[in-house]
Image (spheres, helix red, strand yellow):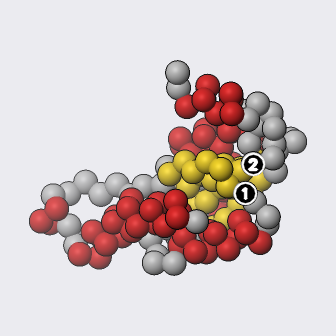
């Protein structure tokens, strides 16, 4: 049983709770947003790419017009990223039930050759911010 079936059984077209998707502006993040909306979740979409978020928002509204959508433009590599996302969801009255941590940074180079700045960015996006989002 995949995640789609588990979510469908939890919230079949309920549209009361929210799912938060990071990396929502393109690729798999966009697909997660669409599928979650189709199964009955309102969606909080987070990404650094404002234009891509708007495109994802329009796509979700086309396939699930009754779903509420909140877009949050946020760089997830900064220390207070989770706080900023939480502030946006709280201000909008969103009760987040599901976190889909899809955001990621890909940097194809050996760790010894990777700059300290890039290593810190990778650690923030892949570890710190998702952990802090889970605490909220």
Left or right of residue 93: residue 121: left
Q: With respect to residue 79, does 101 lie above or below?
A: above
Q: In 3D space, how far apart are the residues under numbered discs 1 and 2 (Cα atoms)?
A: 6 Å
Left or right of residue 20: residue 79: left
Residue 71 placement: quadrant: bottom right
Residue 41 placement: quadrant: top right
SS under mark 1 = loop
Callouts 1 and 2 close, C-beta under 8 Å: yes
- Using a 10 Å C-alpha cutoff, classify the residue at mark 1 as few (fewer than 14 neighbours), some (14 to 19) or many (20 or more): some
Which residue is labeled 2 in the image?
Answer: 17
Q: Which residue lies furthest to the top in this view?
A: 1
Residue 14 in sight from this viewpoint: yes
- On residue 71, the disc is none
Going from N to C along the chain, the mark reached first, 1 or 2, is 2
Residue at position x 44%, y 62% from top? 131
Q: With respect to residue 83, does 66 lie above or below?
A: above
Q: Which of 9 and 105 is in front in this view?
A: 9
- On residue 95, the disc is 1
Q: Nearer the viewer, residue 120 or 59?
A: 120
Residue 89 in the image, given as x and y percentages of width and height: 71, 65
Residue 111 in the image, given as x and y percentages of width and height: 16, 62
Residue 36 in the image, given as x and y percentages of width and height: 68, 39
Q: Which of 132 and 104 is in front in this view?
A: 132
Residue at position x 68%, y 29% from top? 8
Q: With respect to residue 52, does 132 lie above or below?
A: below
């Amino acid at each position: 049983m995949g995640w789609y079936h588990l979510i469908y059984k939890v919230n079949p077209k309920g549209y009361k709770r929210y799912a938060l998707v990071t990396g929502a502006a393109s690729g798999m993040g966009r697909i997660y947003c669409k599928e979650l909306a189709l199964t009955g979740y309102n969606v909080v979409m987070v990404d650094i790419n404002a234009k891509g978020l708007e495109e994802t928002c329009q796509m979700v509204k086309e396939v699930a017009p009754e779903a509420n959508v909140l877009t949050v433009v946020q760089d997830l590599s900064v220390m207070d990223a989770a706080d900023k996302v939480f502030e946006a969801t709280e201000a909008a009255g969103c009760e987040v039930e599901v976190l889909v941590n899809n955001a990621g940074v890909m940097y194809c180079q050996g760790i010894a050759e990777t700059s300290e700045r890039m290593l810190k960015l990778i650690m923030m996006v892949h570890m710190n911010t998702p952990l802090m989002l889970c605490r909220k």
